[in-house]
Image (spheres, helix red, strand yellow):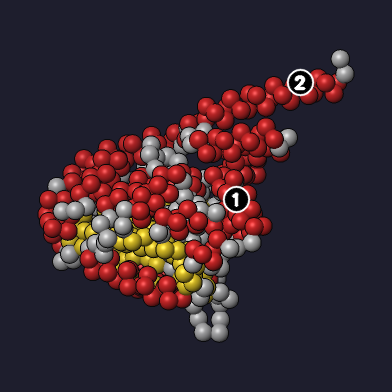
Amino acid sequence: MSWLLVYEILYVIVVILVCLRIIYDTRTITKTLAYLILAIFVPVFGLIFYFTFGINYRKRKIYSKKLLRDDNLRELFQRNILDEGLRQPGSAGEVLRHNRELATLLLRNSRSPLTVNNEVKVLINGEGKFPEVLRALRAAKDHIHLEYYIYEDDEIGRALEEVLIEKAGAGVEVRFIYDDFGSRSIRRNLVRRLRAAGVQAFPFYEIRFLKLANRMNYRNHRKIIVIDGLTAFIGGINISDRYINREGGLPAVFWRDTHLRIDGPGVHYLQYLFLCDWNFCAGEQLYPDQRYFPLHLSESYKGDKAVQIAASGPDSDMPTILFSMLQAIYLAEQEVLITTPYFIPGDSLMDALTVSALGGITIRLLVPGISDSRVVNAAARSYYTDLLEAGVEIYLYRKGFIHAKTMVVDGKIAMVGTANMDNRSFDLNFEVNAIVYDEEIAGDLAGIFMEDILDAEKIDITEWRRRPWYKELAEKTARLISPLL
C-alpha cells in the first residue's frame, strides 16, 4: 500500500469524524449544512475553517466560569433588586395592555424586569450622543462603568479619556471593559494611560495568538455606560470620530446611528449586565448593593417611560434578543419599521416578516445602500426578492452608511440597541437592546425613520426582478455562506 493511499484513507476518516462533530455540536440546520459542505467539498481548507470559526463554545463551556459567576450574581440581584422590579408591570397600565406577551417573555426568559417611571431621551448620531455623554460623565459622583466594542484613540476618544482620568483622580471609581478585537488600537497606548491614572480597564476575552480566530468569533458588541447606578446610555454608537458628522471633516461618509439615554430604574439591568461582564474580565467579585443599585428609583424619578432590557450572547440559554424581535413583530397590528445595517435573517425571522406582511401588516425595512462589506451586502440582497413578493417595503439608504439598529411597532414599542439582524448578533456576540413601551419615544423614532427614507431609494420589485443574472448568482452564492457570516 502506497503512502499516498494511506494519507487518503486517514483524511477520509478525519473528514468523517469532523462531520460527526459538526452534526453533534452545531445548533442550527443551516449552519450544520454549510459546515458539512465546506468540510466535504473544500479539502483541507474546509476543515481549517470549521476549527477556526465553527467550534460551538456554548457546549464546550468556554464561558463556564462566567456562567457560574453570573448565576451567583443573578441570585443576589434577584433577591435584593429584581423582586422590587417584578412587582412593577401592574403599574404600567394601559401601555402594556397589548404588549404583555413581550414583557412576560423577557421576564421568564432572562429575568429582565419591566421598569416604569423612567426618563428616556433619543440621541441621533455621534454629534447628538457625545455632548450628552460628556455632561453626564462630568456629573458622576460615585462610579462610572463603560463597556464598548470599539473605542478609538482619536479626538472623541481622548476627550472621554480626559474626563475619565479627571473623575478617577477625584475619587470616582471608573471601570472600563473594551473588546480586545474591536478596540485593539488602544491596547498599548490609551489603555495604559487610563490605568496609570487610576482607571480600572480590562479587555473582554483577551485575544491570544494561538486562539486568535476562535476568540475573534465571540465578541462583546455591547455599548453600555452606567453612571452612579442612575443614568445609562445604550445603542449603536461606538466611541470613535467616525460617528460624528462634521462639515468638511471626518467621516468621509455620512454616518447615521441611534442611541438612548435612560434615567431611572431601567438602568438596573444594564448595571447587572456590566457587573457580570466585569467579574468575568477582571476576576473580581462585585456584588449588587445600594451603591450600584440605588433602591426606590421608580419613586424618585418622575418619568413616564416603561423600559425593559433584552440581552443575549454565547452564555445565554436562548437567543433572547431574537425572541424579543419575533414576539414584537407578531404583536404588530398595523406596522413595523426596521432599521439595520446588517440583514441576514434566519428562517424564523424571515417567516415572521413574511407572515406579517402577507397578513396586511405594513413592514418597512431600511438597510444600507452603501455597505462596509460587499459579501454581507450581497448575502442580504439574496433575501429581498422573497420579502418584496410578500409585500415588504425595502429602502436602500443613500445619504451615507446607516448603522442604527432600531425597530418600531405600531407607534407603541421602540427597540434600540446593539444587535444587528444576523446570526452573529443573535448567536455569537454579546449584545443588548433596550425596549421602550411608550408612544412618545416610538413616535419620535417613527418620525426619524420616515425622515431617513427620504434619503433612501425604495426598491421597485419589477426593476429588482430585471437585475442582471450574474448579480443574482453572486447574491445567491453569498447566501450559501450567510450562516457563517
What residue did someone put label 1 on?
476
Disc 1 crowd, CA 10 A, few/some/many (<14, 14-19, 20+): some
| Any part of residue 322 in sight | yes
Observer-nearest of 211 and 336: 336
| Location of residue 275 in the rendering, given as x and y in whole percent from the top left corner | 36, 48
Q: Amino acid at mark 1?
A: Lys
Report the quarter where the N terminus lies: top right
Q: Left of 240 or right of it: where is 51?
A: right
Instruction: Name which residue lies at 58% across and 63% down.
Output: 466
| Any part of residue 232 in sight | no
Instruction: Name which quarter of the figure residue 297 lies in.
Output: bottom left
Q: Left of 370 or right of it: where is 166?
A: left
Observer-nearest of 189 and 277: 277
Q: Amino acid at mark 2?
A: Ile
Observer-nearest of 310 and 192: 310
Q: Secondary structure at mark 2?
A: helix
Q: Earlier in the sequence, mark 1 or mark 2?
A: 2
Instruction: Name which residue lies at 64% across and 53% down.
Output: 473
Q: Is residue 366 above or below residue 69?
A: below
Residue at the farthest bottom position: 248
Disc 2 crowd, CA 10 A, few/some/many (<14, 14-19, 20+): few
Instruction: Name which residue lies at 46% across and 50% down.
Output: 345
